[in-house]
Image: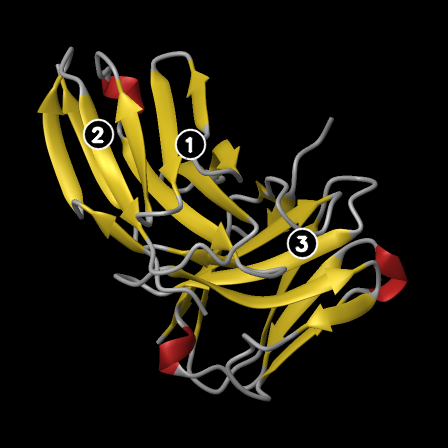
Amino acid sequence: EAGVTQFPSHSVIEKGQTVTLRCDPISGHDNLYWYRRVMGKEIKFLLHFVKESKQDESGMPNNRFLAERTGGTYSTLKVQPAELEDSGVYFCASSQALIGEKLFFGSGTQLSVL
Amino acid sequence: ILNVEQSPQSLHVQEGDSTNFTCSFPSSNFYALHWYRWETAKSPEALFVMTLNGDEKKKGRISATLNTKEGYSYLYIKGSQPEDSATYLCALNSGYALNFGKGTSLLVTP
């Protein structure tokens, strides 16, 4: 069974540019999460989808971040325009159950904004 | 948001040493406590999920305990091996989201 896959694994862009990250969750997992780790800090929650609906987007930093999950399958996270402080590792995770079950993580996208 | 603290921040041990890390939290008001193992450039991998006070879980040489009354969880590694080198992350389910600690970075040298 394929795990959670993320693309790209690395992205280097200039301040002001746009970047779109993609996540393919494990097939059948209704729950999809985005997290971010800024260097030296803890991994922080960004948002949670249940199928195609945004269940909780309280962790999204600001309106430069837009997440979508059309059709309830893969998800994209777009940053437009990117700022220096957006640099970090963006993780996607999926699960079958809502609360209390382990999450399956992707290997992350390392985003560097110069 | 629950504040999750992990200690130590980093640890360097010799192969064969046993070691343990601590995850502490201020409240027992959460659904579950998770431990993940993360090697850089790889996916964080779930080790344990614990829900009840007194829970103990074991997976090979790694085990974990949970004390919700005093607000801590311990992760133990018996006879550390170089392949155990990784960052060990503790997280709490207070709702849908996981609140992570900063992790403990373990280096095991031969």
Question: Which numbered mark, 2 or 3, is in the foreground of this view?
Answer: 2
**Residue drawn at 23 percent across, 41 percent down:** B105
Q: Quadrant of residue B109?
A: top left
In the image, farthest residue toward the right: A71
Marks 1,2: beta carbons within 8 A: no
Q: Quadrant of residue B4?
A: bottom left
Which chain contains the residue that carries disc 2? B
Q: Amino acid at mark 2?
A: Asn
Marks 3,1: beta carbons within 8 A: no
Q: In the structure shown, which secondary structural element does the residue marked by tag 2 occupy? A: strand
Which chain contains the residue that carries disc 1? B
Identify the residue under disc 3. A23
Residues packed near mark 3 inside 10 Å, few (<14), some (14 to 19) or many (20 plus): many
- x, y percentage for residue B12? 11, 31
Q: Amino acid at mark 1?
A: Gly
- x, y percentage for residue B55? 46, 30
Q: How is the image coloured?
A: secondary structure
- x, y percentage for residue A105? 57, 44
In the rendered view, tell whether residue A103 sits above or below residue A47. Answer: above
Disc count in the image?
A: 3
- x, y percentage for residue A106? 57, 44
Marks 2,3: beta carbons within 8 A: no
**Split into 4 quadrants, where in the image is the N terminus of chain A?**
top right
Q: In the structure shown, which secondary structural element does the residue marked by tag 3 occupy? A: strand
Identify the residue under disc 2. B20
Q: Which mark is residue A36?
A: none
Q: Amino acid at mark 3?
A: Cys
Identify the residue under disc 1. B54
| Residue B55 in the figure: left or right of residue A76 | left
| Residue B11 in the figure: left or right of residue B93 | left
